[in-house]
Image: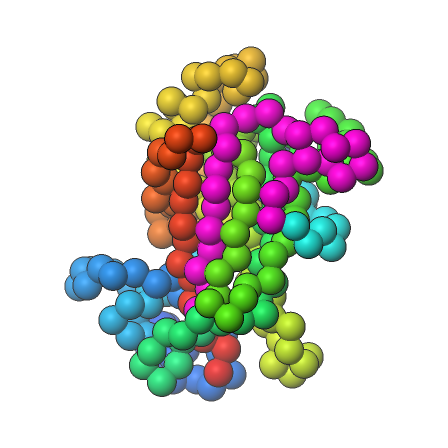
Amino acid sequence: MDLDDIPVGRVLSRREALAFLGASSTLLFLGCSSSADATAPITANSSCLVRPELTEGPYYVDEELNRSDIRSDPSSGAVQDGALLALTFNVSSAGSNVCTPLANAVVDVWHCNALGVYSDVSDPGFRTAGQKFLRGYQVTGSDGVARFTTIYPGWYQGRAVHIHFKVRSSGSSSSAYEFTSQLFFDDSLTDQVHAQQPYASNGQRDLRNAQDGIYQQGGSQLVLNVSQIDQGYAATFDVALDNS
């Protein structure tokens, strides 16, 4: 079992969320939503839902690659093959009963390629030291938006299909924050994508969302709503941070 399989973090209970919302020193990770479902987790306001933090895993490398298109390896220019995924983050700050765009937040993204391989790591199954494909960060603008061009991830043993992300502030050490979690995909969509090459050459994946120990920590709140576009797929994920 990879270290990436060890779950970290959990979904807040309603009571815990209420207590945390009242504590000025607490950082919450929230997802903006238009849903008014009464069964949803406690909200900071009508448009923000508490989301779970999940493990960073063993494959994070701070490459300091400020780029929107993360498909290529900077040293060779080689582009990873796979279905295009246009991934957009809308990052907001929750406070005073309103969500406002959060500027200057650093959003890191990293994930495996179509064959389940991460760049710039040494693993029993692969050694990719020096390569930096499918890694990069963007800084949100005044609208709180960070955009990435990547590919639909592949799979590797013991994990459901996922994308890692990290949101960091650029403020002083006293006000700085860092939040790490993972994004997931609808299994039926993954079945369709992975039936095509180059994914099909990696065989059929051994784990679906419901069997993934990390997904069980709250991944149902982190499933991307993916739409098909002419070139491939697109998804937008709304997040709000309460760092008051």
126 with respect to 227 (left or right) = right
Q: Which residues are magenta?
A: 68-92
| Residue 53 visible, this orientation | no
Q: In the drawing, does residue 86 fall left or right of residue 95?
A: right
**Residue nearest the observer in this picture, 184 or 232:** 232
When the figure is inspected, residue 131 is found, relative to residue 137, above or below; the finding is: above
What residue is rendered at 55% in x and 64% in y? Answer: 140
What residue occupies the far front of the structure in this picture?
230
Q: Which image quadrant: the N terminus?
A: top right
Q: Is residue 41 visible?
A: yes
> What residue is drawn where x is 54% and y is 34%?
151
Residue 82, percent from left and from top: 54, 26
Colour mode of the rendering: rainbow
Q: Position of residue 222 (x, y in %)?
A: 40, 50
Q: Who's the residue at 42% across and 35% down the image?
A: 233
Q: Main secondary structure of the magenta part?
A: loop
Question: Total of numbered circles in the picture?
Answer: 0
55 or 155, nearer to the observer: 155
Q: Examine the image and state in which quarter residue 78 appears.
A: top right
Residue 228 image point, x, y percent: 36, 34
Residue 192 located within the stretch drawn in magenta: no
Q: Residue 229 falls in which quadrant of the image?
A: top left
Provide residue 109's location: percent of width, then percent of height. Answer: 59, 49
- In depth, the one of 160 and 191 nearer the eye is 191
In this rendering, is residue 101 above or below 165?
below
